[in-house]
Image (tube, grey):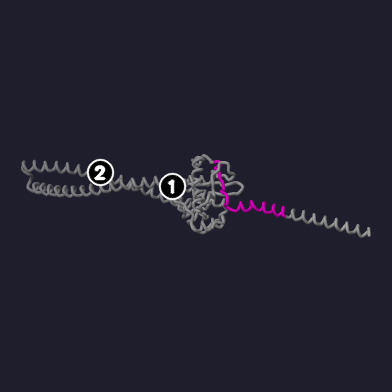
Amino acid sequence: MKFLKKIFLWLLFAAVLAGLFWIFFNKFIEKDRSLLSLSAAPAALDKPCNRPLKFAIGSVDPRFNITADQVKTIAVQAADIWNKASGRQLLEYDPNAKLQIKLVYDQRQRESDAADQLNADLENLSVQKTTLDKQYGGLTQKYDQSLADFKSNLADYQKKLDSYDQEVAKWNAQGGAPPPEYDKLTHERKDLDSELKNLQSEESDLKHLADQINGIAAKENNIVSNYNSQVSTFQSEYGGSQEFEKGVFNPSQGIDIYQFRAADDLRMTIAHELGHALGMQHVQNPKSIMYYLMQDQDLKNPAPTAEDMVELKSVCKLN
């Protein structure tokens, strides 16, 4: 009997322990589930584009001839392109942000500067050619009028000279001219000599004009040849589409800008690289900001194309 009682007490004790263990186990599981839920919460909060991607302005090489404040203004404009298109604050300037936009001067910008200088030289040659064209036109017009006057005066002189020669021959055939006729012929001879000098002067002026015209023509031909040569150089070295190697986004290094020619160009390049910073890839429309070439984009009034928006919505999970 005592033995059975002991067994009963042991079973009762075991049941109590089992009950306590079950209660403790259930509370532990609930606590663990709560921890799992809390650990999953940040992932939901940190979904793509849920919080603004902040950026700052890093080093700006002075050889770009632009200040950090100017770069900041342009970068904020570039960020607003995506902010306005999405209706959300996807990008935000923060001077303490880890993502920095830096302007790094290297061979690419040197080539861009050389292209700008070459373009300025072409414009200067074009102005020179225009000036020479006006000079050439004015001198040619003057030459044509002077030549016409010279030919008319020469014809009139030749007519008077022929009449004089006939009159002299007539009187010579008669043994000589009487004094009044001789004085008349002498006066005519002086007038003819004076006209001849005038014709010779006109002829000299015409030659001078012709030399001027030929000199201008030679200069213009040289300018045209130089212009065509430089145009060929410009088109072969700097013309056509430019791949977006002028700017690079690296998650660990930020955005490095290597090349731009004007503020509009810089804004488009930064907008492109900020798109990459958001996670966007290249799209196929040549007019798109995220196209891999700087080609047909509207630099003056930049706005995302339909293809840009499809990529942005896909990356940021926008409706």
- Magenta-drawn segment: 30-59
Q: Position of residue 303 (x, y in %)?
A: 47, 53
Which residue is label 1 attached to? 119
Residue 205: image tag: 2
**Residue 167 versus residue 187: which sits nearer the camera?**
187
Q: How crowded is mark 1: few (under 14 residues within 10 Å), some or many (20 or more)?
A: some
Q: Which mark is residue 227?
A: none
Q: Quadrant of residue 106?
A: top right
User: Viewed as shown, does residue 289 lie left or right of 143?
Assistant: right
Label 2 CA crowd tier, 10 Å (few <14, some 14–19, many 20+): some
Q: Which residue is drawn at 45% across and 46% down?
A: 118
**Along the line of sight, the residue nearer the viewer: 280 or 145:** 280
Q: Quadrant of the C terminus?
A: bottom right
Q: What residue type is labelled 1?
A: Asn
Position of residue 55 measured from the top left corner of the image (x, y, whole percent): 56, 45
Instruction: Find out whether residue 43 is within the magenta segment.
Output: yes
Contact between marks 2 and 1 (CB within 8 A): the answer is: no
Q: Which of marks 2 and 1 is nearer the N terminus?
A: 1
Residue 180 on image: x %, y %: 5, 41
Q: Is mark 2 on a helix, strand or loop?
A: helix
- Front disc: 2 or 1: 1
Reply yes or no: does residue 114 show up in magenta: no
| Closer-to-camera residue (25/64) | 25
Q: Which residue is drawn at 29% across and 48% down?
A: 137
Q: In which quarter of the image is residue 313?
A: bottom right
Kind of residue sitting beneath label 2: Asp
